[in-house]
Image (spheres, grey):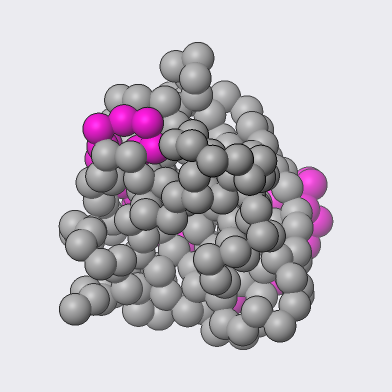
Amino acid sequence: MSTSFAVPGVPFELIASEGSDWTVADDRVAVNAPAHSDLFVDPSGESGTAAETMLNAVTLLGTPGEGDFVFSARAGADFRAMFDAAVLLIWADERHWAKLCFERSPAGETMVVSVVTRGVSDDANSFTVDGDAVWLRISRIGRVFALHASTDGTWWHFVRAFALGDDLGDVKLGFEGQSPTGDGCAVWFDDVRFERKTLGDLRDGS
């Protein structure tokens, strides 16, 4: 049986993935990401553990409905292993989705990373973060999605813009936690905001 949550700042219900331990207390959303959990469809198509399709990350997702929106939250994690991450996620189906991550890099740094999946996943590093939290944002403008990140919650750095495809039906929006190479990590989100509006210039910091 799925567990539903009302998250302050979000005007629609969010449903937890099966077996996950999401909690919502005041304005803080948190979960323990299990060991070896991820969302990734390896573009190489090769076999083997490193190239397997992994769609076992814990998620907390709801349906925002039609129209443009801006969805943001401050994200953090107790980074333990490479690729541990706190994530904002937009999901259409198992082959069409995108995530914006606050993630631990192979070099041990924390950074903003994005993945867009249209059949297979890509993987793009954005910038490193000097701190234990960062603001992440997903916006929809017509058929386009835009990803931004901010170190202060005010000035937004453009990460990327893309389309997932047409005729995908209602997308879902929300949170994800992952620990692809590790034994699990705790992730959290606060300052959660959802606005039914159209973002203007994608590159002017607003």
Residue 102 is situated, as x and y percent measured from the top left of the image, at: 48, 38
Residue 10 is situated, as x and y percent measured from the top left of the image, at: 41, 71
Lateral position of residue 120 relative to residue 17, left or right:
right
Image point (25%, 51%), residue name: 31
Magenta stretch: helix, strand or loop mostly? loop
The quarter of the rendered structure image containing the N terminus is bottom left
Residue 33 is situated, as x and y percent measured from the top left of the image, at: 28, 45
Considering only vertical position in the picture, is 110 above or below 16?
above
Lateral position of residue 3 relative to residue 144, left or right:
left
Magenta-drawn stretch contains 181:
yes
Image point (27%, 39%), residue name: 35
Residue 118 is situated, as x and y percent measured from the top left of the image, at: 68, 60
Considering only vertical position in the picture, is 28 above or below 144?
above
Lateral position of residue 3 relative to residue 178, left or right:
left
Magenta-drawn stretch contains 118:
no
- Count of numbered labels shown in the rendering: 0
Considering only vertical position in the picture, is 184 above or below 38?
above
Image point (69%, 51%), residue name: 206
Q: What is the magenta range? A: 179-206
Give residue 82's quadrant in the image.
top left
- Which residue is nearer to you in this view: 133 or 2? 2
**Is residue 187 visible in the rendered structure shown here?**
no
**Is residue 180 visible in the rendered structure shown here?**
yes
Give residue 69's quadrant in the image.
bottom right
Image point (49%, 19%), residue name: 106
